[in-house]
Image: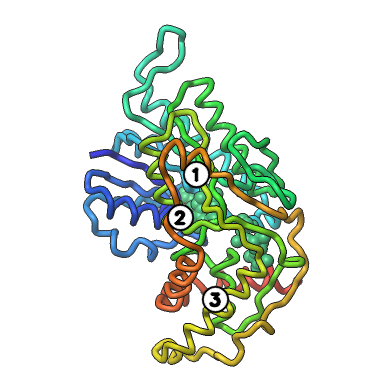
Amino acid sequence: MKSLLVTGGAGFIGSNFIHYMLKKYDDYRIVNLDILTYAGNLENLKGVENNPNYRFVKGSITDDQLVGKLFREEDFDYVINFAAESHVDRSIEDPAIFIKTNIMGTQILLDAAKKHWQTGKDSQGYPAYKEGKKFFQVSTDEAYGSLGETGMFTETTNLAPNSPYSASKTSADLIVRAYSETFKMPVNITRCSNNYGPYQFPEKLIPLMIVNCLKGKSLPVYGDGMQIRDWLHVKDHCSAIDSVLHKGKPGEVYNVGGNNEKANIDIVKLIIDTVREKLSSNPDLSNHNYQLSTINYQLIKYVEDRLGHDRRYAIDNTKITTELGWSPSYTFETGMSQTIDWYLNNQDWLNNVINKDYLEYYDKMYSSK
Ligand code: NAD
Ligand code: TYD
């Protein structure tokens, strides 16, 4: 058995990753360490909670005592660090928790891994480690900042994060890099573009627009809506992490993206058209009291732009595709259609997520826009 610490596994990507790994490998034990912030949801993990190869631990990556205890109990081979505060708008409202979780939490995990994996020193005085270990940092293309109309991010593009969120993620990357350079820790970093798919919390563009369509609420498009993101289905992100975990060269950074640039306003229109079409053609779904007549482009509301809003992201994925043989499997059209189906068919999940806290958050963030 391989023993894997997944942090933040109750969030969007982490929970998809746990499902993916437990389905694919029966010789992996996964320990999910998650503090269950507003974004952590154990409902995402229904179906694996009784799997004997899975253990959930409620706690923080910033708790060094707990992290050390888990290393001693579970003797991890790999750490995959998803745990983070992940939303740019929240980081503009309140940066402090981003610094604590994303930067300090990463350093605490690195330190625990170093202590637990180190066997001694090599002839040059560098730490030597047990065989087959890896620390995996799940990072973001937002570390590279923003692009103009042309060009793409490669792994050698300068790091130039603009938001408190991306600055905290970039800082964590640099600490991971430092542990690789100074302590020769076996690490990989992936920098992935925007993900979409099941279990994404409806504060991010795609699920927020789906939910608002269903509720007949306005669809808040920031600025002119012409900002571009490079979208990747979350399952393709999971398969990329799997590839890098098993084949990635220690010390290397890999960009992950699906060559799928879309302007925000085009995505919003696609969601309106698809939700409308699915509701009109499926009488079962129409029973849910949706107001089909209100689901049209008039729901779109151009609102005040995000501060420091990055204009365009685009990933050059040549390194991971050529060196590791990974490629995305979803087209955007199929991925979006399945994602909208998932939200339509998981009303209970949605209704539990859209609780009092969510509605308070929504009012606070959007009432002034
Ligand atoms: P998410 O917000 O859905 O989930 C984050 C999870 O981390 C939650 O379950 C939360 O409870 C947990 N968490 C937060 N603070 C914690 C702490 N102190 N200790 C333990 N757990 C804690 O985020 P996501 O969209 O699933 O993103 C996962 C990772 O991938 C993040 O590191 C993010 O920066 C990165 N990433 C996300 C995207 C994207 O499009 N969503 C793209 C590239 C990279
Ligand atoms: P988001 O999903 O927050 O991801 P990120 O900011 O990390 O890329 O936002 C994606 C894009 O959608 C981004 O350009 C901001 C924009 N956006 C809106 O126009 N309206 C919204 O309500 C949200 C949440 C995002």
Residue appearing at x 48%, y 86% in the figure: 279
Is the C terminus in the top left, top right, bottom left or bottom right quadrant? bottom right
Relative placement, left or right, of 162 versus 201 is right
Ligand 2 is found in the corner quadrant, namely bottom right
Query: Among all residues in the image, which is located at the extreme top?
Result: 123
In the image, residue 60 lies at what x, y percent?
46, 47
Q: Residue at x 50, y 31 (%)?
A: 252
Q: Nearer the viewer, residue 365 or 123?
A: 123
Q: Residues within 10 Å of mark 1 (few under 14, many from 20)?
A: many
Secondary structure beneath label 3:
helix
For the residues labelled 1 and 2, say whether their Cβ atoms are less than 8 Å apart. Answer: yes
User: In this figure, which residue is indicated by the disc labeled 3?
Assistant: 211
**Where is mark 1, residue-wise?**
138
Q: Going 60% across and 39% down the picture, which residue do you hit?
A: 154
Label 1, label 3: how far apart the Cα atoms are: 27 Å
Horizontal side of 195 relative to 246 (left or right) equals right
Residue on which the image places disc 2:
13
Above-or-below relation of 318 to 211: above
Asked whether 253 or 333 is in front, the reply is: 333
Ligand 1 within 8 Å of the CB at mark 1 = yes
Contact between marks 2 and 3 (CB within 8 A): the answer is no
Q: Tell me which numbered mark, 1 or 2, is placed earlier along the sequence.
A: 2
Q: In the rendered image, which quarter is residue 77 located in?
A: top left
**Visible residue check, residue 167:** yes
Amino acid under label 2? Ile
Give the residue drawn at x 43%, y 53%.
Answer: 14
Up the image or down, 121 lies above or below 241; here it is above
